[in-house]
Amino acid sequence: MDPPGQEQKEWRVRAWIRTAGVLVVALLAVMNLPSMERRLNPEGLPASDRVWGYLMLCGAVLATWLVAFRPRVRLSSERWVEVRNPCRTSRFHADDVVAVEPSLYGVVLVLRDGRRPWTIAFQATLAWSGEPRWFDLAEAITGERPVAEAVED
């Protein structure tokens, strides 16, 4: 999107979530491969069950990639926004964004024409700094930083 040397901002799924996804897939492989491979376990699963085991392991790898590694939001130096989700990518100019709102599964960008592209790159996870990460996105796109609401007991 940007020529080399141009500044752009990019937000991805948190590193610890990506790491957890890889660890889960690795754990599934370690737990299931010995029973699926005949050379490791001569008394292993029948051939039809091994096929399903490999398909499920491949499905876990694909799901981890789609949910933890593919999603991102990129803001180019020309102020073009690219929102990439597991199965869809949206591109629009930052001036078309009228609001940035949190949602149950991430953040929704409300556009002038009524479209509402969303991103799961900003899941509602613990904010170490006291503010959610999507505040940085909202400020970069709209120029205004949202105000954190006080939580009452």
Image: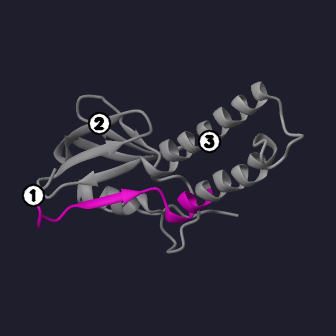
Give the mark nearest the N terminus, 3 or 2: 3
> In the figure, is residue 115 to the left or right of 151?
left
The mark found on residue 128 in the picture is none
Label of residue 90 in the image: 2
| Left or right: where 36 falls relative to 14 | right
Q: How dense is the environment of label 2, judged by Cα within 10 Å: few (below 14), some, or many (20 and up)? A: some
Q: CA distance from mark 3 to mark 2?
A: 25 Å
Q: Nearer the viewer, residue 56 or 10?
A: 56
Residue 3: assigned label:
1
Q: How many marks?
A: 3
The kind of residue on which mark 3 rests is Ala
Is the Cβ of the residue at disc 3 closer than 8 Å to that at disc 2?
no
At a point 90% along the width and 40% down the height, the residue shown is: 43
Q: CA distance from mark 1 to mark 3?
A: 35 Å
Residue 56 image position (x, y, % from top left) = 67, 35
Q: Amino acid at mark 2?
A: Ser
| The magenta segment | 3-20
Could you say where residue 33 lies in the image, as x and y percent from the top left? 74, 47
Establish if 53 lies above or below 82: above
* Circle 3 residue: 60
Q: Nearer the viewer, mark 1 or mark 3?
A: 3
Q: Secondary structure at mark 2?
A: strand
CB of mark 1 within 8 Å of CB of mark 3? Answer: no
Question: CB atoms at circles 1 and 2 under 8 Å apart?
Answer: no
The reply, left or right, for residue 44 in relation to residue 142 is: right
Depth order, front residue of 137/12 = 12
Q: Secondary structure at mark 1?
A: loop
Residue at image x 73%, y 54%?
Answer: 30
Question: Which three-letter amino acid code belongs to the residue tagged 1?
Answer: Pro
> Which of the pair 90/108 is nearer the observer?
90
